[in-house]
């Protein structure tokens, strides 16, 4: 990764709907709060946070397995966030659960135990978010066997 800062620019379009510009020719994404605040014309900030955690974990797992020349494709990930009030009565993301599913049976992958023991430590987003929000991680193979 580069030492250059990451810059994302948001421009309000209407009410709680914002265009999110990532630069470098990446298509603009529209974010919006669900009703009753917004009109739900794009992912909410909580959904974007879930996507960032899930994407980073998926990338880290894929990278770690590919280092050993393994093909776990296609990896799927679902991220569940619990939103509620904290002790001060403020709405917060209280907890997240990420469920990763490999596209192949575990028996087809070499070095899987080693990868599962360490891949999440290399996930920049999840490790950062996890300092403030508890994140549970579950990993399954395509047969439904829980690996982590």
Image (cartoon, rainbow, N blue to C red):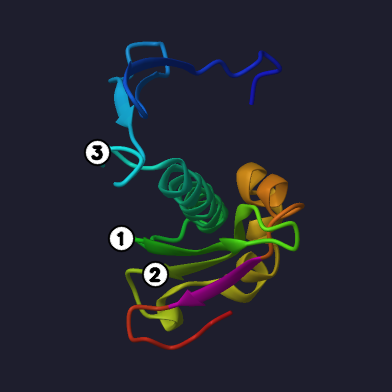
Dot 1 and dot 3 residues touching (CB under 8 Å): no
Q: Earlier in the sequence, mark 2 or mark 3?
A: 3
Q: Cα distance, mark 1 to mark 3?
A: 33 Å
Residue at 66% x, 42% y: name it: 124
Along the line of sight, the residue nearer the viewer: 103 or 76: 76
What crowding class fits label 2: few (fewer than 14 Cα within 10 Å), some (14-19), or many (20 or more)? many
Check disc 2 and report its element: helix, strand or loop: loop
Q: Disc 2 vs disc 3: Cβ atoms closer than 8 Å?
A: no
Camera-side residue of 140 and 78: 78
Identify the residue shown where x is 41% and y is 48%: 47
The quadrant in which the C terminus is found is bottom right
* Number of marks in picture: 3
**Picture coordinates of residue 58, whole percent (x, y):** 47, 54
Q: Which mark identifies residue 74?
A: 1
Where residue 76 sits in the image (x, y, percent)?
35, 62
Question: What whole-number distance in Å separates the C-alpha atoms at marks 2 and 3?
Answer: 35 Å
Query: Residue under circle 2?
Result: 102
| Image quadrant occupied by the N terminus | top right
Crowding around mark 3 (Cα neighbors within 10 Å: few <14, some 14 to 19, many 20+) is some
Between discs 1 and 2, the one toward the N terminus: 1
Helix, strand or loop under label 1: loop
Q: Where 20 sits versus 37, above or below? A: above
Q: Is residue 79 left or right of residue 2?
A: left
Using the numbered discs, state the Cα–Cα distance from disc 1 to disc 2 in whole angstroms. 7 Å
Question: Who's the residue at 57% across and 54% down the image?
Answer: 64
Q: Quadrant of residue 100?
A: bottom left
- Range covered by the magenta-colored residues: 135-140
Q: Which circle marks residue 26 in the picture?
A: none
Q: How crowded is mark 1: few (under 14 residues within 10 Å), some or many (20 or more)?
A: few
Q: Height in image: 85 above or below 55? A: below
Give the camera-side residue of 52 and 35: 35
**Of the numbered discs in the image, which one, if any, rests on residue 39?**
3
């Amino acid at each position: 990764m580069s030492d250059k800062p990451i810059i994302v620019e948001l421009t309000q379009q209407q009410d709680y709907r914002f265009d999110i510009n990532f630069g470098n020719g990446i298509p603009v994404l529209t974010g919006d709060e669900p009703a009753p605040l917004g009109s739900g014309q794009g992912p909410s900030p909580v959904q974007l946070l879930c996507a960032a955690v899930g994407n980073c974990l998926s990338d880290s797992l894929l990278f770690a397995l590919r280092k050993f020349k393994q093909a776990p494709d296609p990896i799927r990930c679902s991220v569940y966030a619990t939103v509620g009030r904290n002790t001060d009565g403020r709405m917060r993301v209280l907890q997240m659960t990420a469920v990763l599913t490999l596209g192949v049976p575990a028996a087809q992958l070499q070095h899987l135990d080693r990868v599962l023991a360490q891949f999440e430590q290399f996930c920049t987003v999840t490790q950062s978010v996890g300092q403030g929000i508890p994140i549970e991680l579950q990993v399954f193979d395509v047969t439904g066997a829980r690996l982590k």
